[in-house]
Amino acid sequence: MSRYKLEAKIREKTGKSGAMRRENRIPAVVYGPNIESQAIEIPLNEVQKFMRHQGTGSTLDLVVGDETHLALFKNVQVHPVTQLAMHLDFQALSATEKVRVTIPVFIHVSEHLRGMMVQELLNEIEIIALPGDLESSISIHVDEGEIGDVLTVGELDIAKNEKIEILTDLEAPVYNIVELRDFSEEEEEEAVEGEEGEVSEEAETEEESE
């Protein structure tokens, strides 16, 4: 499985992150047990492209100068208004040491599931594996099914991979399929039930007054 390749430059000066961002350069840091913490910078357009394809917990080849680090995308700070990345953290990994990460789950539902709705019950799972065996995400395509169907963590393909240890409960449901109901009908039913309740209360009040 090929890894995403992201190129960065060593940040010569620190303490001026705001000015860097105005120049469309995003500050970042890479650290790990076998390297010194290093301040780096990445072009904004490269960060945006990277984050469209990768989430926190994914592994990548981080190229800094003439060195390539097998790294884990550890964290991202996002601007509360613009939602643009402000700072990224990467952890350099050892190819021979297992790492514990949380990876996202993406569920893609087919248009053929008419009259049914897929309820997403789990959006991430936690795993332990060597960096070379890590999955960056899990994609599930729901093309068919019946009302009442449930998929658990233990039924995912990743759970059958002997090189990966699943820490999330294997019995935890990832999604289930329920009947797709017309919300307007539900609202009408609730309104009718509400009216019936009001009528009952009025009747009780009249009986008490008599």
Image (cartoon, helix red, strand yellow):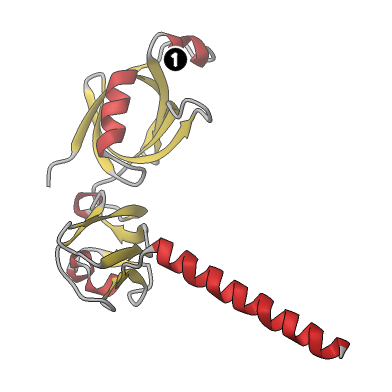
Residue ranking furthest to the right: 209
Which x, y percent locates residue 201? 73, 81
Can residue 55 be seen here? The reply is: yes
**Which quadrant of the view contains residue 67?**
top left
Disc 1 packing (10 Å; few <14; some 14–19; many ≥20): some
- Please tell me how many numbered marks the rendered image carries: 1
Residue at 48 percent across and 65 percent down: it is 187
User: Is residue 121 shown above or below 24?
Assistant: below
Q: Nearer the viewer, residue 191 or 158?
A: 191
Q: Nearer the viewer, residue 33 or 25?
A: 25
| Amino acid marked by disc 1 | Arg
Residue at 35 percent across and 68 percent down: it is 181
In the image, is 116 to the left or to the right of 173? Answer: left
Q: Secondary structure beneath disc 1? A: helix
Can residue 8 be seen here? The reply is: no
Question: In this figure, which residue is indicated by the disc labeled 1?
Answer: 21
In the image, is 171 to the left or to the right of 162? Answer: right
Residue ranking furthest to the front: 210
Q: Nearer the viewer, residue 16 or 209?
A: 209
User: Is residue 85 shown above or below 199?
Assistant: above
Which x, y percent locates residue 204? 76, 86
User: Is residue 155 shown above or below 19?
Assistant: below
Which x, y percent locates residue 66? 22, 20
In the rendered image, which quarter contains the C terminus? Answer: bottom right
Residue at 47 percent across and 31 percent down: it is 78
Which x, y percent locates residue 84? 42, 26
